Amino acid sequence: MKTERETTRIVRSWLEIGADRLPDRVLDSVLEQLPQHRQRRRPLLRQGRFSPMNPLAKTAIAAAAVLVVAVLGYNFLPRTGSVGISIPSPTPSPSPPAPSSSALVLNLKVVYTPSATGGSVKWAPNTLSAPADEAFQIAMKVPQELNGDTHNLWIVTPSQLETERAAIVDRTGEAIFRGGDSLEYGTKTYDIPALKAGTYYFVCTYYLASMQGTLTVP
Amino acid sequence: MDTELVRRAQHGDEQAFASLAVVVGDRLHAVAHRILRDIELAEDATQRALLSIWQDLPRLRDPARFDAWSYRLLVRACYAEARRTQHWNPSLRLLPTDEPETGEGLGSVFDRDQLERGFRRLSIDHRAVVVLHHYLDLPLESVAETLGVPLGTVRSRLHYAMRGLRAALEADARPTAREATR
């Protein structure tokens, strides 16, 4: 019988055997394909194009901004009984269509637990329930500390999760619902089509191992 | 890792990315080959991973974490390749071996064969943990960070995988049916 240490030693020396040089043709092929693969960029403010500002400069600019607003306000805002430049009140802009008041909205949070090794992310709550044969919404809230981290929401059946796991991770697998990516913090609302009664999983394909909750449709 | 090179590549500098790919390509390929156990699949996975790295580099917030991040993309690429091909079969069923053991020198060859079979039975999740920890020598905490899973998950995957590999090695040591009836 082999001891644990012996097994580790054998496995380690076995892993030493194998390819250790990427053929030039593969590298050449990658470099040739670069122009056809555009880089996916984050919104400008989060790309680090602006170098971090020192706190003193921040305070000075904020103070200057307050002063400018105060001076402008004193000089130009209309006062009772005085003549001045009247500023037209802003026309209300159309707000995005509100979800149907009758649609059920399930709230879901992405919870981040920091640790010395980088932390972990999970759903909260980990179980949801929705009525059968009725469309509903899931409002996914991403905390500020995960800004820039990609999350999404897919709904899959247990058999899809079992047989399509690798493809789901690669975002090519079969699913009942495929929600788009969220790159910023805040709330992203997904419109979920009516589901038949049964048990489903709601997952984030980027963190499939830790972000896997159960959706019950009674 | 040269973080300046990473920064330049993040801003679309193809020359910088070419230099980066030369630096990391061999290592990524070596890891892919050890996970997938197939040279062609490993080449495809490495190619796919390098293109993903190029596309997603602007989203990498801390260039100093490039290594861990690139391994994560590589493991995803390995998933994709394993899925795409019919060569990979995680539930491979083995026929019992009937080969006699003929000395200690050949014992290591048997070990290698049995390990190969035992390893092919593991999922990509389990293989990745074994390779990152036992081939790249990454501590378990770094493996967890690289794969984006909790430390406990890494520990349990490693335990399960090593138990499977140990069982595969011990299967070799058991007497064959022919020997048992002698």
Image (tube, rainbow, N blue to C red):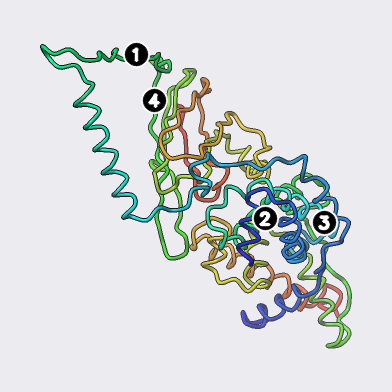
Residue drawn at x 54%, y 62% as measured from the top left: B144
Residue A92 circle label: 1
Q: CA distance from mark 3 to mark 2?
A: 18 Å
Q: Which mark lies nearer to you, 1 or 4?
A: 1
Q: Quadrant of the C terminus of chain B?
A: bottom right
B48 or B178: nearer the viewer: B48
The answer to whether mark 4 and mark 3 are in CB contact below 8 A is no
Residue holding disc 2: B75
Q: Secondary structure at mark 1?
A: loop
In this rendering, the answer to whether B140 lies above or below A59 is below
Q: CA distance from mark 1 to mark 2?
A: 50 Å
Q: Amino acid at mark 4?
A: Val
Residue A27 circle label: 3
- Viewer can see residue B118: no
B130 or A28: nearer the viewer: A28
Q: Earlier in the sequence, mark 1 or mark 4?
A: 1
The answer to whether mark 3 and mark 2 are in CB contact below 8 A is no
Q: Amino acid at mark 1?
A: Pro
Q: Amino acid at mark 2?
A: Val
Q: Earlier in the sequence, mark 1 or mark 3?
A: 3
Q: Quadrant of the N terminus of chain B?
A: bottom right
In this rendering, the answer to whether A32 lies above or below A21 is above
User: Where residue A155 appears, x then y in whole percent?
Assistant: 55, 33
Binning the other alpha carbons within 10 Å of mark 3 as few (below 14), some (14 to 19) or many (20 upward) gives some
Q: CA distance from mark 1 to mark 3?
A: 55 Å
